[in-house]
Image: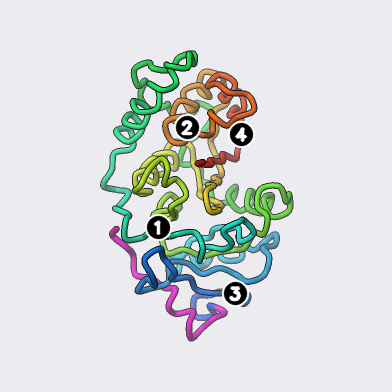
Amino acid sequence: MATLPNALPKLVSDPTGGTLGLALPPGKLIDTTDDGPWPEPLLWHAERAAATGDWAGVEPARRTAGLLPLLIDVGGGQGGPEGWELMPDEVSYPGDHDPEDVLAEYWEECAADEAEGGEEGAGAEWPGLAAVPVSGTARNPNADELAAEIADFIVTDGSWLKEPRLALVPARRSADIPAAVGWSGPLNHENDVARLCAVLRSWEDRFGIRVVALTFDQLIVSVAAPPTTREEAEAVAVEHFAFCPDNIHQSSEPGLGAYAEHLIDQEIWSFWWD
């Protein structure tokens, strides 16, 4: 994967990030991958629990060092990112993939299985990308502010992450974060997470999403311009099904129609791969 200059090594001699305009708590640099140490750190994360305001507090790193904020969970069965089987050497560049081609391919593979099960609308021809919601601009100027608000909500709510930690990742844009760390959470669905990041880039442009949190196998994004009508939500639900079929398969109310209902005005999208 094509990468940016990585500012994380500066934290070795400057652990609080003062030269980057930060005041970081004690933390650790992660270079552990499934194949051994990576030449440079893939991410930094705090060793204390995340608190409200942490996300907004590292905003200078975005501007001065190309380090983007993220919440990670160190409380799952696999522990922190050292145990996540990160695979940066298996990742291509998100910009090399067309998001619609990626989703259409997933749709073709997954919808056939749904058709066999009698799922309404499944097995149909790929309908194309959902339109930008008419309720607002996709390039929402408040998308980063909303991401900070959602991060604070996740930290205080307690039901999303077991042990949240603030992290910093060197990445061109929020959508690239999973690829930048070589995240393998969707491995049963896609071996090259950069293809999923291409879709996330498209969602950034159309819906103002930001990657807010990662666990071993879960991705959480904020959504600045969510669908506001049933028609818009149904079009987005098709993309979610192609992107993460388990969201529909494992839902307490299976089916694209029921899933779409939950997307209306929803400012948090969560994806989990079995």
The mark closer to the camera, 3 or 1, is 1
Residue position for label 4 = 266
Amino acid type shown at disc 4? Gln
* Proximity of marks 3 and 2: CB atoms separated by less than 8 Å: no
Q: What residue sits 61% from the left and 34% below the top?
A: 266
Classify mark 2: residues with Cα within 10 Å, few (<14), some (14-19) or many (20+): many
Foreground pick, 100 / 53? 100
Residue lying furthest bottom in this view?
13
First in sequence: mark 2 vs mark 4: 2
Cα–Cα span, label 3 and label 4: 32 Å
Residue 265 coordinates in the image, percent (x, y): 61, 30
* Proximity of marks 3 and 4: CB atoms separated by less than 8 Å: no
Cα–Cα span, label 3 and label 2: 38 Å
Cα–Cα span, label 3 and label 1: 24 Å
Classify mark 4: residues with Cα within 10 Å, few (<14), some (14-19) or many (20+): some
Residue position for label 3 = 24
Residue 2 included in the magenta stretch of the image:
yes
Amino acid type shown at disc 1? Gly
On residue 112, which mark appears?
A: none
First in sequence: mark 3 vs mark 1: 3
Residue 154 coordinates in the image, percent (x, y): 67, 50
Foreground pick, 271 / 229? 271
Foreground pick, 147 / 115? 115
Residue position for label 1 = 182
On residue 245, which mark appears?
A: 2
Cα–Cα span, label 4 and label 1: 28 Å
Looking at the magenta stretch, what is its main secondary structure?
A: loop
Residue 180 included in the magenta stretch of the image:
no
Q: What residue sits 28% from the left and 43% below the top?
A: 97
Q: Which residues are magenta?
A: 1-16
Left or right of 58? Residue 183 is: left
Q: What residue sits 37% from the left and 15% below the top?
A: 124
